[in-house]
Image: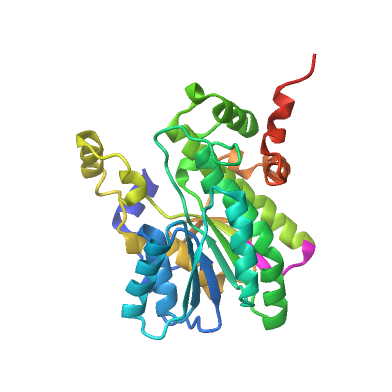
Amino acid sequence: MLETVKYLIGSRGPSGYGSKSTAEQVTDRRDLRSITAIITGATSGIGAETARVLAKRGARLVLPARSLKAAEDAKARIASECPGSEIVVMALDLSSLTSIRNFVAEFESLDLPLNLLINNAGKYAHNHAISEDGIEMTFATNYLGHFLLTKLLLNKMVETADATGVQGRIVNVSSTIHGWFSGDIIHHLGLITRDKRQYDATRAYALSKLANVLHTKELARRLKQMEANVTANCVHPGIVRTRLTREREGFVTDLVFFLASKLLKTIPQAAATTCYVATHLRLANASGKYFSDCNEASTSKLGSSSHEASRLWSASEIMVSGDPKAAFRPLHPSH
């Protein structure tokens, strides 16, 4: 109850910020002119605000998007407010492992540094679908695509950090909804990939967001083991009325949003935690942590499991290796 009251009044936590803080406020006086950032899902909503604010602080942006027109429109909006900002638009479909590999190859050909990777893109799919690689679409887009993207860009981030002395940062955008999933992650993914009758949109979304949390945990452990000058953290942006939540319109949806309006964040408020974790000097060397309302917070019990994080990583390596369904084969023991 106390936490809810603190949230509603925007009470500030140890960081000096809270639920009412905006992305511009948490980046005030930050000079990001030496920073190159890739932000997925930056054509609308929280991602677009994150991109706008980072560009305003001087960062060079790479905006990958499935729709190049949407990305060009986003670039034009930012450029109109921040003349002289450097923004590169590139094609990327996160549900396609081939598209991700093509994007990384194209990015590397530009010979740009990479200081900051913000894995922000997300979808909530009401209807069951399978990616071209044979994986349930919500998981493929929200988690597995970002897993491969991060894996392929990691060397560039480590090299940039070594060459510049500036610590690299990876920010995974998750959700408090990750705590709604319980059970065996790999087993459930196998079920909903094979059988659409087992598909529940909210549970699939929660599963993908839990995977983001576990990815952060294991990635941070591996970065530390590598002695890389790169950190990985995870954020819950808060619930905001964006295109993600409005894929299905209707009276009930609108009523729920009206009743919940006091709990919903504005987009500038929702982008604040991402921008804080991506840029604030106070978070130097902070890694493997989960943030909400610009302050460190606790994940679900499953989200804090090192065993589950390691297990998901191993399964993910198999899924991106060319035979995704091999990750589910233990579900079918030979007789």
Quadrant, the N terminus: top left
> Which corner quadrant of the image does residue 136 belong to?
top right
Image spot of residue 332 (x, y percent): 72, 21
With 246 as the anchor, is 34 left or right in this view?
Answer: right
Q: Residue furthest bottom?
A: 84
Image spot of residue 51 (x, y percent): 42, 69
> Which corner quadrant of the image does residue 300 belong to?
top right
With 329 as the anchor, is 6 left or right in this view?
Answer: left
Residue 53 visible in the shown view:
yes
Q: Residue at x 22, y 37 (%)?
A: 250
**Near-viewer residue (59 or 309):** 59
Q: Residue at x 36, y 78 (%)?
A: 79
> Which corner quadrant of the image does residue 329 belong to?
top right
Quadrant, the C terminus: top right
Residue 12 visible in the shown view:
no
Height in image: 23 above or below 31?
above
Height in image: 151 above or below 256?
below
Image spot of residue 331 (x, y percent): 70, 24
Q: Residue at x 34, y 45 (%)?
A: 245
The residues colored magenta run 226-232
**Near-viewer residue (177 or 114):** 114
With 155 as the anchor, is 240 left or right in this view?
Answer: left
Q: How many marks?
A: 0
Height in image: 332 above or below 170?
above
Image spot of residue 319 (x, y percent): 68, 42
Q: Residue at x 60, y 56 (%)?
A: 100
Whether residue 276 appears in magenta in the rendering, the answer is no
